[in-house]
Amino acid sequence: MTTLQERTRFEPSEVEPRIAERWWSSALHHPEPGGTPRENYSIAVPPPNITGVLHMGHALNGSVQDTLIRYHRMLGMRTKWILGTDHAGIATQAQVEKALRAEGTSREALGREAFVERVWQWRAKYGGQIIEQFKRLGATLDYDDERFTLDDGYVRAVLEVFVALYRKGLIYRDHYMVNWDPGTRSAISDLEVEDREVDDTLFHVAYPLEDGSGEIVVATVRPETMLADTAVAVHPDDDRYRHLVGKAAILPLIGRRLPIIADPYVKTDFGSGALKITPGHDPNDFEIGRRHELDEISVIGEDGRMTAAAGPDYAGLTAAEAQAKVVAALTEQGRIRHTEGYRHTVPFSQRSGERIEPLISLQWFMAMGELAAPAIEVVRDGRITIHPESQSRRYIEWLENIRPWCISRQLWWGHQIPVWYRGADETYVGTEPPEGEGWVRDPDVLDTWFSSGLWPFATLGWPDDTPELRAFHPTDVLSTARDILFLWVARMVMLGLEFTGDVPFEDVYVHSVIQAPDGRRMSKSLGTGIDPLEEIERHGADAVRFGLLAMSSTQDVRYSSEKIQQGQRLANKLFNASRFVLLNVQEVDAAPRPQTVYDRWILSRLQAAKATFARNLDDFDFAKAALGLYDFVYGELCDWYLEFTKGREFDAEQSATMLYVLGETLKLAHPVIPFVTEELWSHVPGTDGLLAVTRLTPPDDVLRDEAAEAEIAAVIEAVQALRSWRDEAGVKPGQVLPARIDGLDGSAGLVARMARLDLEGDDGPTATVAVPGGTVEIRAGDLVDPEAEARKAAAERDRLRREIARAEGKLANEGFVAKAPPQLVQAEREKLERLRRELDGL
RNA sequence: GGGCGGUUAGCUCAGCUGGUGAGAGCGCCCGCCUUACAAGCGGGAGGUCGCAGGUUCGAGCCCUGCACCGCCCACCA
């Protein structure tokens, strides 16, 4: 490591590993349990899948959570960021199966036990990858206490919840229409289904009437499912068909008798107004079938092929093959009246990408209504606050319309359902296997989200009454992506309330989705993904954290590499500002000893920056928090304060104030840009511990100084006016000009120094510049072109006159004077006065 | 088919319960190696706030309609 003197740039790649080593070998991230949840601060990380690699969403969410965690840790709270990973049933199983295929084998060939063992090995090898990547970001998760949703303790929690809900009658087994995913060969939940637009053919097929009096035409995009038709339905008020209700049609190809029924679900204005009813393969038909007690026939099996019930001509064919054969047969029999192209939305599996095959299956379900009601209530009454607020409406609406949750999955990797069967009608449900011979366990596992739903408390040891649970539950904040608000967040609230009697967290922050810079989705397949680790390599972890927070919003945002670079510049700026202070000051204790108005000014502005930062975090406005830091460091500390100090000798008093301001700034910025601040902190005299565990003192009202703020505001405005004048007059930046300042009182010297004016000179005035509270006469001799100067002065007078006219017009408006708030009218009057004085001065 | 959100400077975005001349970063132009930083510093140009009406003393902000863009929900075969 070179000395600070030699390093003119902040080099993240050199600094980060060194700082990380200090953090991870310390105890900063691991709190011993103690105290109460109210005085402690905790966040449960959304558990990354063990198949996961860090993507932009993780990086943003990690930055958000770590900023909150570090900030509250520095406020002196006992802080725990709960770490763990999710077994991610389908995703992990698919990954391992893929590897097996590459080896020329399969899970079936291995058998269940060996396969599960294989997955555990896979997890040991790759499952920790993403955790290492979180460390690169500087995330102070509790790495000493890592959980996994298939750990023994966690499994116990899952089984206990299952059994309790079963005993309560909320978990039950039923033959019901499910979303069958032929890709994973498992049922999946409604939330794992996505609609896609598909071009299909709509076939209009004529079914003859039983009594030979004619035919009834039905429309379908899936003619192969007609093999399972058990009725034809029409609308009860449809005059065209009223006389047919109660009669029957004959199913072509099969010859089955189909009763013609009346049901208001049928639309009279779609197709022919008559609907073939296939309770076994269409969710709506299933509902209608149950209403009318129709037979439920399944002709498509779980393997996506036609079953024996489809008849010998079709059994064994894929659904697509069967469709072709059915259409051919119908055509031959002259039953197809016509066909048309038809574009509509069709459900697909998000997991496998295959088209969902709705079918009736024996599955486990969870009744949700009873659990949903209190989960709605806690958001309504404010025990949980969702940010941004618009998301709480989505949450409530979803819960109000919630439907039973299919929780069983036909997979091997996961929590196997704690149910055993013996013979045809014995069922045992319990956390421990049953006594006696002949019991066979239900082969299915639970939906991954069942176990994730217990995350905030199962990770802390629930159902045992552990010290961790007593100290950190309920957690404070849950920060997550929008797409799992229902899948995960709502379920944690329901299960948390049911089993712990408390909310699992008090605030939910729904972060932005980061899109590619062109507004498309970031995705590997589109080639639009940006790897956060590569960005960290390029710009540093601080830059990435800052940039992600700065671009975050209450809505989706495009990835902005400019914001990342802004973060990089901030880190570099802070690095150099610190060098300036550290290499010039005397080593003294850092209690502030303000000697000048600008000392008092920066101390006051520092309090404002602290207060603003705190408020922005309270509001979950991370962009404002990050950009507010930037503004303070650039716009106040560096552009003005450090420049002001250059005029003085750095005596003990000056040094003390500068060191104090530097130290407080590093503390304030640390939650957002932890690496550079930690590095610099190690160079601040009198500090030996980690900045990450140093106490951040709240804003101190005693240090607020309105007089100093007003005075320096005027100085800044004057300096800017003078620099602007100089630039326009073409005066060299280095040239010191004689001048006389009228006004600005004690700050005249400061203004003169910043604007490179010499107040001792005596050349005859050649130009006048208006500044707040006075004028500056600059004696620039022949540097100044009198004509240009006259033109500029005239333009300035014109501008002032226009402003004056505007203000006068406003004050002449009776409506304004009568109805606007008095202080506003007063301010307008004062503005007018000031403008008139400025005009007079010229 | 319903909801929700967006449309502000060339680009990406801020603009609090309507209130003084609409902001930032990047980009652009001009000038500077002013001994913390050239990944820097100083100065500057650039906007009919999507369109059309309305309410108000006053509208980027409120109301109505329209146009695009995005997201969510939904059982029209």
Image (cartoon, coloured by chain):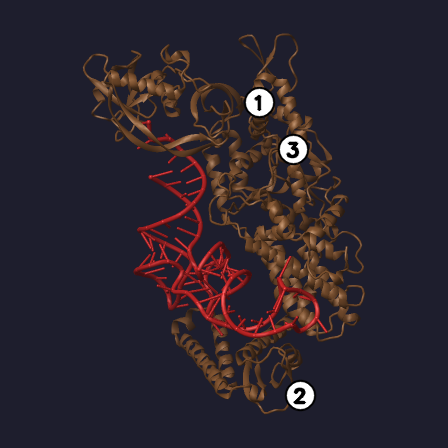
User: Tag 2, which secondary structure?
Assistant: loop
Marks 2 and 3 close (CB-CB < 8 Å) = no
Q: CA distance from mark 2 to mark 1?
A: 88 Å
Identify by letter the chain in red: B
Answer whether residue A137 is visible to the viewer in this image.
yes
Viewed as shown, does residue A325 lie left or right of A425? Answer: left
**Residue topped by disc 2:** A760
Q: CA distance from mark 2 to mark 3?
A: 73 Å
Q: Amino acid at mark 1?
A: Val
Q: Position of residue A264 (x, y in %)?
A: 30, 26
First-in-chain label (1 vs 3)? 3
Q: CA distance from mark 1 to mark 3?
A: 20 Å
Q: Amino acid at mark 2?
A: Glu
Identify by letter the chain in brown: A
Q: Amino acid at mark 3?
A: Gly
- A514 versus A489 height, above or below: below
What is the chain letter for disc 1? A
Q: Position of residue A730 (x, y in %)?
A: 55, 80
**Residue topped by disc 1:** A445
